[in-house]
Amino acid sequence: MSTEIDSLKKEIDKLRAELRDATQHNDSSYYFSNEALQNFNSTSHIPERGMAAKTVKAIIENNHVLDFNQKLNTSSYVNVSFEEEEEAVAMMGLRVNLADQTVYPQSYKMHDTVVNMLAGLWHCPVPGDIDEYGVFPGAGTVGSTEACLLSGLALKFRWRQWYAKRHDLSEEDVRGIRPNMVISSCYQAAWEKLFKYMDIEPKLIHPAAGCFPEDAERVRDAIDENTIGVVCILGNHYGGQYDPVWDVDKVVREVNDAKGYQVGIHVDAASGGFIAPFQEGLPAWDFRLDNVLSISTSGHKYGESCCGTGWVVWRDREDLSEHVAISVTYLGGKADSYTLNFSRPASGVYVQYYKLLRYGMSGYQQCCDNMMSNAKFLRDGLAAMQSEGKPRFVMLDHGDEHCLPVVTAMLNPECNFSYDDIDLQHVLSQHHWYVSGYKMGFNHPLTEETIALFHDADADQTMFRIVVKSNLTRDMAQHLLDSFGEAFAFLDAVDFSKLHDFDSVQLRHKDQRTISNHC
Ligand SMILES: Cc1ncc(COP(=O)(O)O)c(C=O)c1O
């Protein structure tokens, strides 16, 4: 009897093992397979045996749902609205490697068409060699970071040639001389990569708090013989303000004339490249200004593409983009490759091309108008919020026009709140919104020392921003304002001073310098 029971038990164990195996490799639910008991995130090994497609998808989905909701992420500039067709186009592009220009010439043609469209949007003069190349000097990149790196490199090599000639030195001699670049301290981390990787010294222009744009007169003082170029940001990621390229252009011309330099401007239009062209009354900021040598943008921000994409356009090939070009021949034609990486999927190009055709100028105009209008709605709503008769916020953005659709503010120090903007971020997240608070300080790209963003505000002071994107409708904006109201009901009822290690909240605020939007 007992041997029969034993063999039955064995049989049952075998069947169980078979069932487990079957659930691993067929379409059955992940949730009763033994993988559901494993923590793949904590292991660094490739599993011995593969898993069912549904299982793997479920594992990835389970990670994904733990992220914040993209559509309620007002912290990032990345576009999050898709059309079905756009997704299909992106999938189509995934299988095409853009490096194979010979195999995929038509895909590359779409790339070139986008470069030409952007050159036109930014008023780039038609280069003399357009017939030879069929395209303006420019490139599609992974994002603005790669585009900024390429622009910075072109300026560096251009400067080297100029410096060698000016001092009758060999290029080898000039390699030992450290170049610099003039840029606002409100730069995005993309530039930190240029300074670190390419050994370029940043000459930082620190704006006054509440007056973010680069001061052209301070740019004048910063330029010297080793300056490869001046960066103008359109607009900065903190508050969406535009650096006054038009003023910087004048200053650069005057310095060049007076000192015999050939300094030029790169416009980092990561976000503004698809916004500024649709804003009436803005002074010329693009290739209409003679000293603007290159412009970069991100397709995945206000270019409305859903895939990570960047674009750079140069004014000329000669003594500019040629410095970073690798010549490739394909189908008997001539082409330049600029990107840091050869291989990459065509999805970014396909989707950008899709978006440009799908929206047209009128679509981008409408999108820009809607976002600016929703930003105003939010700005007005926040500005009206009060605590004991005082405004709850000091507004720090540029206002309703000639800037990005961004609302930036800080809690009003005069209200003596025991919480800061980061606490506000956390409480708002309970209402599903991601509104990021951050400090008015950053690490120096080379020394790593913490320095203040503004020349007249503490690096520890906090603020927050709301990036308005095309998916944010008026209803959603109203919900966000209501969430602020509910968040304050909670924050006001709790004493956060211990959390911040304040002896007394008053003491902290006494030392705080007054910041106002005086720009
Ligand atoms: C002004 C500016 N430059 C560069 C970048 C980097 O862009 P990407 O993430 O496309 O590389 C950003 C991103 O926010 C930005 O705001």
Image (spheres, rainbow, N blue to C red):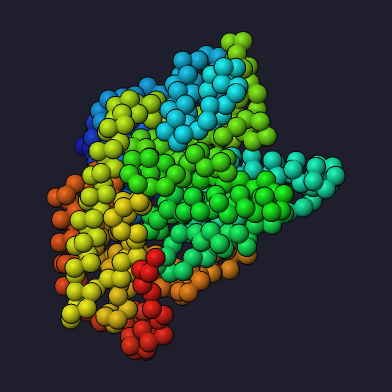
Tell me what residue is drawn at x 34 percent, y 61 percent.
397
Estimate the x, y position of residue 109 in percent, counting from the top left: 47, 19
222 relative to 184 in the view: left or right: right
93 relative to 264 in the view: left or right: left
188 relative to 398 in the view: left or right: right
Tell me what residue is drawn at x 51 percent, y 38 percent.
287
For the residue pair 328 and 285, the one nearer the viewer reads as: 285
Q: Quadrant of the C terminus?
A: bottom left
348 relative to 412 in the view: left or right: right
Q: Is residue 59 visible?
A: no
Q: Is residue 320 visible?
A: yes
Whether residue 347 is situated above or below residue 153 in the rendered picture: above
Estimate the x, y position of residue 163 in percent, counting from the top left: 76, 46
Quarter-of-image position of residue 347? top left
Quarter-of-image position of residue 376? bottom left
Estimate the x, y position of residue 256 in percent, counting from the top left: 66, 50
Tell me what residue is drawn at x 33 percent, y 88 percent.
506
Estimate the x, y position of residue 194 in percent, counting from the top left: 60, 49
Whether residue 454 is situated above or below residue 131 in the rendered picture: below
For the residue pair 104 and 136, the one nearer the viewer reads as: 136
Whether residue 490 is situated above or below residue 242 in the rendered picture: below
Q: Quadrant of the N terminus?
A: top left
Tell me what residue is drawn at x 83 percent, y 48 percent.
167
Q: How many marks can you see?
A: 0
For the residue pair 184 and 188, the one nearer the viewer reads as: 184
